[in-house]
Amino acid sequence: MPRPRLLLLLPSTTYRAAAFVAAARRLGADLTVASDHVSVFADAQPDNFLALDFAQAERAAEQAAAFHANYPVTGIFAGDDDTVVVAAHIARALGLPYTTVDAALAARDKHRQRVLLRAAGVPVPDFALVALDDDLEARAREAPYPCVLKPLRLAASRGVIRANGPAEFVAAARRIGRILQMPDVPREGADALLVEAFVPGPEVALEGLLDGGRLQVLALFDKPDPLDGPFFEETIYVTPSRLSEEAQQAIADCSQAAARALGLTSGPVHGELRFNERGPWLIELAARPIGGRCGAVLRFGVDAEPLSLEALHLHQALGMPTAGVTREPRAAAVMMIPVPRGGTLRELRGIEAARAVAHVEDVVITAHRGQELVPLPEGASYPGFIFARAADPETAVRAVRAAHAHLAFDLT
Ligand code: ADP
């Protein structure tokens, strides 16, 4: 039997490509990494690298089909909302099982997602679409307060702003309008925003895999820092969740219903949900895994060589079973290191001291010297990540907080 080949669509170099390489080696699979720029390695290793036009999904599908004729692809995996849409086009062209184009588009567009979820009876906040050239003062008078304004297609809480009254509504809408003009923002969907009722209560993140339409929960994370706005910076994720079994089941059921409503049947899902006295609320369900680096917080199995999240994705993409795989018994936490303020990074001190904190497994700094750090709501990336493992979630959270206290940003 020929070796299986996985086509990997990674949005950026900060993704854990090495974890996929290791997993592929362990499985005896070949890996082709697709990117939207020509790799310097492409000529030397034409089977390992493939340049695809990520901005034009139909074109990317043709390019992938030409590649497939020489190097048959067995499975496909994509890392973020945009590459999932490209991968869906490729999978359709190649006849591979994958998320449909419709489902990938529905998951990516926050308004379309709300419409489908509401129609299916999934608990979502009241929402309305507001065009940026609408009479914002008039729209502000109709809005429920507190409310949340957000772009339709951005991620990582970029441009998501809470407003407590009409004046804040108008200011937030104008600010989002400016963010949507930024050069790295796709034009599509950039002429409107979504307004929705603010859902109070603790927030969780659900990491799951869909197979044949059924949701397998890989991990449920608590977010111990309250997310009350005006901006919604993610900081700490910790698993296992301290919510009751009953609440966790309701959250899983709600996520399953959301996946069904969006037409998602296979592959990774990452959900953000809130939970309050009325039960779970679906804030967002994405057809992709947890953001690139954070995946390192999850490990599966109990043997000496645990499986990474990337290994699970590889298994699934190649049609190998993942049912029954469970997360390791220890608690694990990751902190997405917040941008302390805007500025150019001159130096980041205290990394070694942070790494030396008990239970801290790693401190990964992705920002480089000279990089412009932009806080929310305009920014969208974290300068780094802190990982900890411990017997219980509280200890893991204390460890990442203690490590973070050692970090000192020198910004100009
Ligand atoms: P993104 O895809 O950019 O992360 P989300 O819609 O998931 O955008 O919003 C980011 C964060 O903002 C959520 O994780 C949540 O903390 C907060 N948020 C968004 N919408 C609401 C809402 N309706 N009520 C309460 N919090 C919200």
Image (cartoon, rainbow, N blue to C red):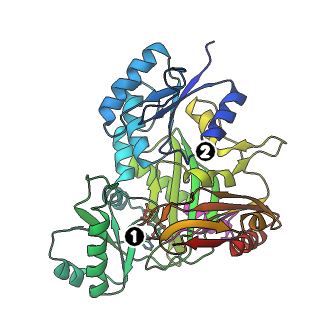
Span shown in magenta: 233-251
* Residue 271 picture location, percent across and down: 51, 58
Residue 160, labelled with which disc? 1
Q: Nearer the viewer, residue 366 or 96?
A: 366
Q: Secondary structure at mark 2?
A: loop
Asked whether residue 238 is drawn in magenta, I would say: yes
Q: In which of the image's four quarters is ligand 1 placed?
A: bottom left
84 or 326: nearer the viewer: 84
Q: Residue at x 63, y 63 (%)?
A: 221
Q: As drawn, is 131 to the left or to the right of 331?
A: left
Mark 2 → mark 1, Cα distance in angstroms? 26 Å
Q: Can you give x and y, in whole percent of width and height, for residue 333 in the image?
A: 69, 63
The mark closer to the camera, 2 or 1, is: 2
Q: Residue at x 69, y 44 (%)?
A: 308
Q: Amino acid at mark 1?
A: Val
Identify which amino acid the numbered label 2 is placed on.
Arg
**If the image is split into quadrants, where does the N terminus sit?**
top right
Q: Disc 2 marks which residue?
A: 16
Is 397 a magenta residue? no
Indicate the quadrant where residue 38 lies: top left
Q: Residue at x 18, y 82 (%)?
A: 137
Q: Position of residue 362 (x, y in %)?
A: 73, 57
Give yes or no for contact between labels 2 and 1 (Cβ–Cβ under 8 Å).
Answer: no
Q: Earlier in the sequence, mark 2 or mark 1?
A: 2
Asked if residue 146 lies left or right of residue 208, the reply is: left
Q: Residue at x 58, y 29 (%)?
A: 318
**Residue 167 rendering spot, x and y as whole percentages:** 27, 87
Q: Decide if residue 406 is on the left or right side of residue 5.
A: right
Q: Residues within 10 Å of mark 1 (few under 14, many from 20)?
A: many
